């Protein structure tokens, strides 16, 4: 089963470290079952990296968080800002395997107006907290947002223009402590 496989990989990784500490003689005790587990783990890592490199959702988010460094998370057409990579990686480590599309509006859709504006009345308010300078993350839905005052050139950036906007704490935004 899916979960069992990720769990077995964790066990195998722990076992690997144990074997390394215990020295070469212990290595003989490696069984074919253990080697099969190692193969499954490298397959899991390969698939996680492949999916990360294409912005796809992760089937085994915990494993993806373990095997894929944040900087390898990208879209088919390009890289992502580092804070957004960090946010996605954090969400995977919480067991949620959303792909990059969860965070990006379609390219031709303008971002929602900032929380608190007249036009946002019928929208679910996000619970923004400051994540990195100019970056916010919603504590309930994990969406990433940008502070337009921190990043005034957002409209020139293909990725930033597809993210919701809200003022960060430093610019008077109503943010909650993360
Ligand atoms: Zn939200
Ligand atoms: Zn700001």
Image: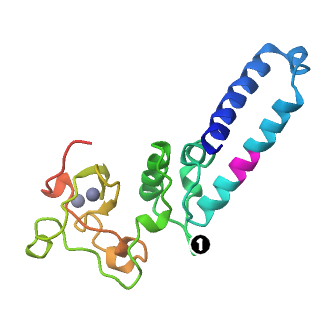
In the figure, 60 relative to 34: above or below? Answer: below
Quadrant including the N terminus: top right
Q: Is residue 33 left or right of residue 47?
A: right
Q: Is residue 116 above or below residue 141?
A: below
According to the image, label 1 marks what residue? 76
- The residue at 57%/64% (across/down) is 56
Horizontal side, residue 171 vs residue 96: left or right: left
Determine if the magenta segment contains residue 43: yes
Q: Quick check: 175 above or below 28?
A: below
Which residues are the magenta region? 42-46
Residue 67 lies in what quarter of the image? top right
Task: Reply yes or no: does residue 4 show up in magenta.
Answer: no
On screen, residue 106 above or below 168: below
Q: Position of residue 97 (x, y in %)?
A: 50, 53
State the residue lying farthest toward the front: 1
Q: Residue at x 82, y 30 (%)?
A: 34
Relative side of 123 to 24, left or right: left
Q: What residue is shown at x 32% (from left), y 74% (from top)?
A: 153
Q: Residue furthest bottom?
A: 108
What secondary structure prevails in the magenta region? helix
């Amino acid at each position: 089963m899916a979960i069992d496989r990720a769990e077995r990989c964790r066990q195998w990784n722990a076992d690997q470290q144990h074997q390394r500490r215990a020295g070469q003689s212990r290595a003989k005790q490696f069984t074919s079952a253990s080697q099969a587990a190692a193969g499954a783990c490298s397959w899991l890592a390969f698939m996680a990296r492949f999916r990360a490199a294409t912005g796809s959702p992760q089937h085994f988010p915990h494993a993806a968080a373990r095997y894929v460094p944040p900087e390898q998370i990208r879209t088919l057409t390009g890289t992502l800002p580092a804070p957004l990579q960090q946010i996605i990686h954090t969400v995977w480590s919480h067991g949620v395997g959303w792909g990059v599309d969860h965070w990006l509006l379609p390219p031709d859709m303008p971002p929602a107006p900032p929380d608190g504006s007249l036009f946002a009345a019928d929208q679910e308010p996000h619970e923004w907290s400051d994540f990195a300078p100019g970056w916010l993350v919603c504590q309930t839905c994990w969406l990433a947002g940008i502070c337009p005052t921190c990043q005034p050139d957002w409209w020139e950036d293909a990725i930033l223009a597809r993210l919701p906007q809200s003022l960060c704490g430093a610019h008077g935004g109503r943010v909650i402590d993360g």
